Image (spheres, rainbow, N blue to C red):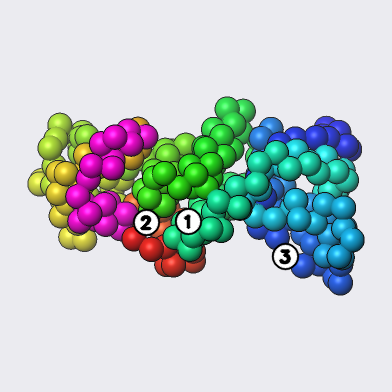
Amino acid sequence: MQQKLYRDDAIVLRTHPLGEADRIITLLTRRHGKVRAVAKGVRRTGSRFGARLEPFTLVDVQLHAGRSLHTVTQVVTIEAFAVGISAEYGRFTAASAMLETTDRLTDEFVDPNQRGFLMLVGALRAMAEGRIPPPLVLDSFLLRTLAVSGWAPELRVCASCGADGPHHAIDIRAGGLVCTPCRRPGAIAVRQSTIEHMIFLLAGDWENVLDADETVMHEAGRLITDTMTWHLERSVRSLHYVER
């Protein structure tokens, strides 16, 4: 049974108003999965921790467990990624897509490896620093998120029969690359350089990622977005605003 009062590190995914002065905060915590909590009085001017519970913020939060909604009792800012992210529209839209994707994919379960939480923190930090173009940080994060969820596209062998590559078409429904005999209507022709770029993105090999041709980056970004949309069974609204 979960303790009534507990503390954890968390990323603020989203907020929405509740009544005249409160907010409901959706958090991805390090050890307790995704939780929704009421932050009372945070919309008042004199709130003790209203500014600390904004999206893109890494916080140390104390929560009182409830049946459906928890209650925020204390919060301390660990790292405010919003400062760097909000400095540029491209960073903001890409980071918003990361938060929305995380919110869609993450149910209220405990991730014993904490991989999803640690990946999001690392991606937000990279986005805030601004040394890597925002679409590339986003695409790498989306691919890694798919991998953690068990949905990583097969990029080396045929997803249908296992035949060794290289192959020159991706079938999102089949789970990745497909060979000529397994290719069905709807499979998308893809450059070998785009496949290699996606492999580098998944591995976080930034040296090779940054050397990619702009056309390759665009093609990979489209395939990654389409793969995420297929598995979520609906589009991520923020992805439509990402500047590529």
Q: Determine the CA span between mark 2 and mark 3.
A: 26 Å
Q: Is most of the magenta stretch helix, strand or loop?
A: helix
Q: Residues within 10 Å of mark 1 (few under 14, many from 20)?
A: many
Q: Quadrant of residue 11?
A: top right
Which three-letter amino acid code belongs to the residue tagged 1? Answer: Arg
Q: Residues within 10 Å of mark 2 (few under 14, many from 20)?
A: some
Task: Indicate whether 192 appears above or below 157.
Answer: below
Tell me where residue 40 appears, x and y as whole percent.
87, 58
- 141 or 78: nearer the eye? 78
Secondary structure of the residue carrying tag 3 is strand
The part of the chain drawn in magenta is 204-223
Task: Name the quarter where the N terminus is drawn.
Answer: top right
Tell me where residue 146 appears, x and y as whole percent.
43, 43
Circle 3 residue: 16
Mark earlier in primary sequence (1, 2): 1
Q: Determine the CA span between mark 1 and mark 3.
A: 22 Å
